[in-house]
Amino acid sequence: MSSAYDQLKSALSGEVVRQGDEGYDYGIARWCDNCVQQAAYVVFPKNAEDVSAAIAFAKAEEVEIAVCGGGHSWSGSSSTTGLVIHLGKYFNTARCDPDAKLIYVGGGATWDPVDKAGAAHGLATVAGTVNHTGVGGLVLGGGWGWLTGRHGLALDNLAQITIVLASGEIVTANENDHPDLFWGCRGGGSNFGVITEFVFKAHPQRSTVFFSFIWFPVERLEEIVNMMEEWLETAGPDETCHWGYFRGGPGSENGEPVIRLMYFYNGPADEARKAAKKIYELEPAGELAFDEMPYLQLNSIQNLAMGHGGRKYCKGITVKPKLTYEAVKAMITAIDESVKDEPEFAASGALFEFTPKQAVLSVPLDATAYAGRGTGRECLTFIFYQTPSLDSKARAAVRGYCQAISRMAPLADHAGKGDDAIGVAYANYDPEPKGAALVFGSNYPRLREVKRRYDPDRVFNRWYPIEPATA
C-alpha cells in the first residue's frame, strides 16, 4: 500500500495527506462536527488530472470515495473513512464572462466568490442563501435561493459541467455533449463523478435589494400562518419570505421564542413594502429592515447563525398542500417539550421557505433529473448543540418535530410535479435514507440507465445512490 500511496503522491500536482499530516484536520473538518469521519486519505487536487489519479488509486485500493466542496452536507455524504477528494482548497474560484452572461465556477467553490464574480458586472445566478455553502452539493441536488422565484432552481441555470468519471475520463457535458450525463447531474447529485467546473447562466441584477427581519410574539401564530398562506398565493417572482420558530437572533435577543420572518424583495424599499402589505398589516412586534442592502450582503446575512462547527442535526419535510395553524402549533409544542427535557437543545427550531414556485414549475419534470417540482411547503427542522453524547437524542428529537406536524397535515410521499412533491422532503434537506427510487420518481429509470453507462460499478455512492440498470 505504501508503494501505491507514494506513487499517488508523486503523480499529483496537489497533495494527499493522512492522519497526522499537515492539512489533514482541515481536510476532514465539516460544517457539522458530527459529520466528521477519520478518512484514510485526503486528496487536495489542483486539476482534473489529479482527480482522475485519486479515483484510480481509490479503486485500486478498494476504498470508498467521498467528494467535499463546502462540506455542508448534514447527511455526512462528503465524509468517509476511505478517500476524500477535497475540492475546497484549490477549486474555490469563480470568474464571469459578462458578454456571454456566464459564470465559470470551480468544483469546490462556495457561493461567496460566485456572488462577487457576477456582481462586479451587474450579474447574478441563483445561489444558496448562505454564501459559505458549497456550490456543488447545492446545485446537484436542486438549489433553492433568493432568486428562485424569478430564475428557477440553481440547477435550472446550469449551462455546462466538466466532470471526471469513474473511469478517470475527463469530459465536458452540456445540452449537446453527453446530454444524458448533463441531464442526470442536474438533480442526481454526486452519483456520476467529480465535477471540477460548473458554468452558470447569469442574469442582470440590481446592486441593492430590500431585506427585513420581522417578528411577532408566538401567541399570534394562527394569524401569521393564515397571513403567510394568503401572501404566498399572490406573491410575485421578485419576493421570497422564509419564516419560522426560533430562539435567538433579531426579536429574540434573550433567547425567548419568537416567530420571525425574513422577507426579501428584489427591488426598491417602497415597492417592497407595498408587496408585503399583508405582512405589515398584522402590525409586527418589531423589525430590522435594510432598505438598500447590497446584493452581495444578501447571501451572507445568515452566515453567523449558520457558522461552521458544533453539532447539528437537520431534517426537511414537505407539507402539502398548505400549512395550517394546528400543524405548526403541534410542531412548536414538540420543540418546546424537547427543549424543556434537554436545555442544550435551546437552539432548536423550524424554518418554512415560502418561495413563489412559478419559475420552478415552468420546467417540465423530465427536463432534468430533479423530481421535486411540487407545490408543497418546504420546512426545515433543526437542532444545534455541542455534546457528542446527545447525537442520538438530537436525531430522535428532530424526527419528533417532523412527526408532530405529519399527524396534523399530509406530507408529500412521492416525487412529481404540480400538486405532487418530492418524496417526503427536498432531498438536500433530508439526511434520512429513503431510497433513490422514491426521491427521483418517474425520472429514476432513466437515471439508472445513465448510471449504467457512466458508473456501472457504483464508485460514487454517497448521496441517494442510484442502482445501475441491468444490461
Image: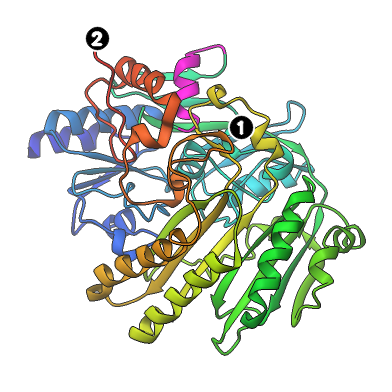
Is 353 rendered above or below residue 363?
Answer: below
Query: Within the image, what quadrant is residue 32 found in?
Result: bottom left
Q: Is residue 274 left or right of residue 159?
A: right
Q: Residue at x 19, y 44 (%)?
A: 82
> Mark 2: few, some, or many residues within 10 Å (few <14, many ≥20)?
few
Instruction: Report helix, strand or loop for mark 2.
Output: loop
Query: Within the image, what quadrant is residue 305 found in?
Result: bottom right
The answer to which of marks 2 and 1 sits earlier in the sequence is 1
Q: Is residue 47 visible?
A: no
User: Could you tell me the amino acid type at mark 2?
Assistant: Ala
Q: Residue at x 34, y 52 (%)?
A: 75
| Tag nearer the camera, 2 or 1 | 2
- Residue situated in front as seen by the camera: 66 or 253: 253
Percent from the top left, x then y, of residue 147? 70, 46
First to last magenta residue range: 176-187
Residue annotated with mark 2: 471
User: Could you tell me the amino acid type at mark 1?
Assistant: Asp
Residue annotated with mark 1: 156
Distance between mark 2 and mark 1 Cα atoms: 31 Å
* Placement of the C terminus among the 4 image quadrants: top left
Instruction: Count up the numbered dots.
Output: 2
Percent from the top left, x then y, of residue 168? 30, 22
Colouring convention used in this rendered image of the protein: rainbow
Is 12 rendered above or below residue 302?
Answer: above
Percent from the top left, x then y, of residue 265? 79, 56
